[in-house]
Amino acid sequence: MWQFTPFIFPSIIATIISLCLGWFGCRHRHAAGAKAFVAINLSHTIWASMQILSVSSVSLENKIFFSKIQYLGIVATPVCWLLFAITYTGYGRLLYSFKSLLLAVIPVITLILVSTNEFHGLVWSAVGLNPTAPFSSLVINHGRWFLVHLAYSYLCVIVGTLLLVITFARSQHNLKGLLTVIAAPLIVVFTNALYLSSWNPSPYLDLTPLGFAVADGMMGWVLLRLRLFDIIPIARSAVIEGMGDAVIALNQQMQIVDINPTAAKLFGKPQNHLLGRHFTEVANEHLAKLTSEENIKEIAITQDGIELTYEVITSLLQGSGNTMVGRLFVLRDITARKETEQSLLKIQRELQQANAELSRLAGTDSLTGLANRRVFMERLKQEVARSRRSGQAFGLLILDIDYFKHINDTHGHPVGDRVLINVAQQIKSMLREIDLAARIGGEEFAVLSINNNLEKLNVLAERFRRQIAIEPYKNDGGEEFQITVSIGCACFDNDNAESLIRRADEALYKAKRDGRNRIHSLTK
């Protein structure tokens, strides 16, 4: 037979809430702690639903039967709470060892003793009906093993709660979650302890399901409102607290609402001293730039006499309705990167200078410092192409030192080298920047005179000839001697580079044949 009593409503409420939370946990089964959370609510459901059946039944045999099944939830709930705390807080690796099976030893023994209680009375020493209750209610005297079960259950709840409290305490922004995980198990423990004590206002009724109804409601609100299965609180400790980057969060009033240890070191003060303080009160002149300068990208901060460079990443913090509630600054130490960049830039500049020097040397005559034949030919072809486009003339001079072999044979090659160097300097000194002088053979030089006709070219050639002829030279013995040059002149006349060189060469040979130390021009 069955009886109806309003005392079953707390258990009904607890059953419904536990089923809903279990379904919610199944939807997030891949999150940390979700499986253990489902197991907790399954245990709650068994405990509360068997409480409904036990209270509703009339006969002693049925009440004892449902109470025994109820122990499946009673022994599982504390262990599942501990498993939830371990997995949710990131310590799930501790369960991979076979030693984790030891958690089930006491609950399994309790279940065995409950099912065989009639033979030993270790769990219930006496069971009967309470004649003074407003409904058919059990009166239970607990045996010795029940104390072991009770102590173990409370230990599991306390250890699990401490793990959650420590984790949430590290997450300074999760105060609601912290308060909830403290309050929820305390409510269950309080109602269970009240039921077992002599102060129970309803000795004929187990108030623990009522505690479950309240605690489950609180946990459900936290899980749904704060989305704790989406944002695990240990993530802040593992990520923000352990970051090498400095993280500073300010509210709209410029107060520091969150800061990690790396950032606290920049202020030179502990975290708890900085939280809640106005930013300008505690920031040094370098950190003050974060709020005083717009779009700041880098700041330099001196620590222990060493200047460090930090990259600044600024983000706006938005609340509901996309309203700005504060700012987040992330400072990343890029000192090593900047030093590397500076070193690379220095190496790059040195390479550019070296390449420029190599390029110059590759196009320079090593003895005289003038352009060599390769550069001369490239420039000559460029001038030919330019003159064809613009119609502006340019001239070519080829100079050859007269009797240079005699100079080497008489005075020696070192003296001959000094003669070549001196001639090159004299030629270069009489040219404009737009002109080009080159050494194209042993004692042969060439000059490109830009935008000059044949008349002006002859004037320039005569200047070369006279200046070189009057310059005195000395050999290693101090004896003086003079040198002369023969010069061939040719102006561009819509011909190509090869024909222009050929005409200048023919003019040079003509000057040589006519007695040397003279100029000869050859037109097309």
Image: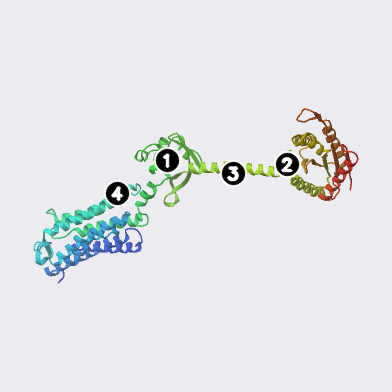
Q: Are marks 2 and 4 in contact (CB under 8 Å)?
A: no
Spatial CA distance of label 1 from label 3 is 44 Å
The 10 Å Cα crowd at callout 2, few under 14, some 14 to 19, many 20 or more, is some
Q: Mark 2 or mark 4, which has the lower sequence index? A: 4
Give the mark nearest the N terminus, 1 or 4.
Answer: 4
User: In this image, 418 relative to 86: left or right?
Assistant: right
Q: Which residue is mark 3?
A: 348
Local SS, label 3: helix
Give the residue at the far right of this rendering.
Answer: 514
Q: Name the residue type under label 1.
A: Met
Of all residues shown, which one is farthest toward the top?
Answer: 478
Measuring from the top left, give residue 274's x and y in whole percent.
Answer: 37, 39
- Mark toward the viewer: 1 or 4: 4
Q: What amino acid is at disc 4? A: Ile
Alpha carbon separation for disc pair 1 and 4: 29 Å
At a point 29% along the width and 58% down the height, the residue shown is 95
Q: Nearer the viewer, mark 3 or mark 4?
A: 3
Helix, strand or loop under label 1: loop
- Residue located at (32% from left, 64% from top): 23
Give the labeled residue for mark 4. Answer: 166
Q: Earlier in the sequence, mark 1 or mark 3?
A: 1
Q: Earlier in the sequence, mark 2 or mark 3?
A: 3
Q: Which mark is residue 365?
A: 2
Helix, strand or loop under label 4: helix
| Amino acid tagged 3 | Gln
448 horizontally vs 129: left or right: right
Q: Nearer the viewer, mark 2 or mark 4?
A: 2
Please name the residue that numbered disc 1 is placed on.
254
Compared across the picture, whether 353 is left or right of 441 comes to left
